[in-house]
Image (cartoon, rainbow, N blue to C red):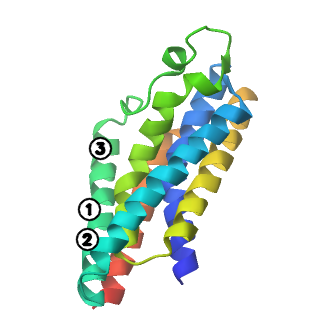
Amino acid sequence: MHWLMILLIGIAASIDNFAVGMSFGIKGKKITWQANLFMAAVALAASLIMLIAGSVVGFKISDFYANLTSGSMILGIGIWSLFSAIKNRNTLSKTFPQAEQIDRDQNNLISFNETFWLSFALSFNAMGTAFGAGLGRLNPIGVAFTVSFLSFFSIDAGQRVGLTKIRSRIGALSEYIASLLLICIGIYTLFVSV
């Protein structure tokens, strides 16, 4: 069951990446594989730091309180994200810079040096969840590498969808899906702690 939880956390952390990749693709902005790899590396490092921090705190308290705190935190992030998505449903998330802002030289190619801030914006999105997963004593290496791999894959898949101009409601629904996944993970973690 732990590996299923790790996979779900990875998916929830990467759905926004798919939406960002797709929105860039729709505008004809191609993210190079080097830039995507850098974003995945930042996601790996940020997740690992927060997972280890969560694990350190988690090992200082009992299993019951570790799971209770982890579940409450992930559930809270999910509920907050859901309300935020509903509130801002008619606007693109302010967390992520627009494609035009990222592509500074306007050559429609997003290179390694143009993704610095976007990398941290995408990683920041998953840091709270990673800390909660660490508290819940999920395998830090497993979670971090899953988040990193799915970050790379989802950005690539999203931009391929966008570049081919295939319209998908996943872009508009990504924040709702990620929020609901986190709510389910939080509820499950709370349920197993009692």
Residue 188, given in percent of the width and then of the height, sits at 38, 79
Q: Does 167 appear above or below 44?
A: above
The image position of residue 97, as x and y in percent, is 44, 25
Q: Label 3: state its secondary structure.
A: helix
Q: Amino acid at mark 3?
A: Ser
Q: Which residue is mark 3?
A: 84
Instruction: Give neighbour class at mark 1: few <14, some 14-19, many 20+ (Cα, 10 Å).
Output: some
Q: Position of residue 123 (x, y in %)?
A: 45, 45
Q: Are marks 1 and 2 in contact (CB under 8 Å)?
A: yes
Residue most extreme to the right: 164
Q: Nearer the viewer, residue 67 or 161?
A: 67
Residue 132: which quarter of the image? Answer: bottom left
- SS at circle 2: helix
Instruction: Specify the amino acid type for callout 2.
Output: Ser
Q: Nearer the viewer, mark 1 or mark 3?
A: 1
Q: Residue at x 42, y 37 (%)?
A: 121
User: Is 125 on the left or on the right of 139, as rendered?
Assistant: left
- Residue 22 to residue 150: above or below: above
Q: SS of the residue at dot 1?
A: helix
Q: Which residue is mark 1?
A: 76
Which residue is disc 2 drawn over? 72
Q: Earlier in the sequence, mark 2 or mark 3?
A: 2
Residue 167 numbered mark, or none: none
91 or 97: nearer the eye?
97
* Residue contact between numbered discs 2 and 3, judged by CB atoms under 8 Å: no
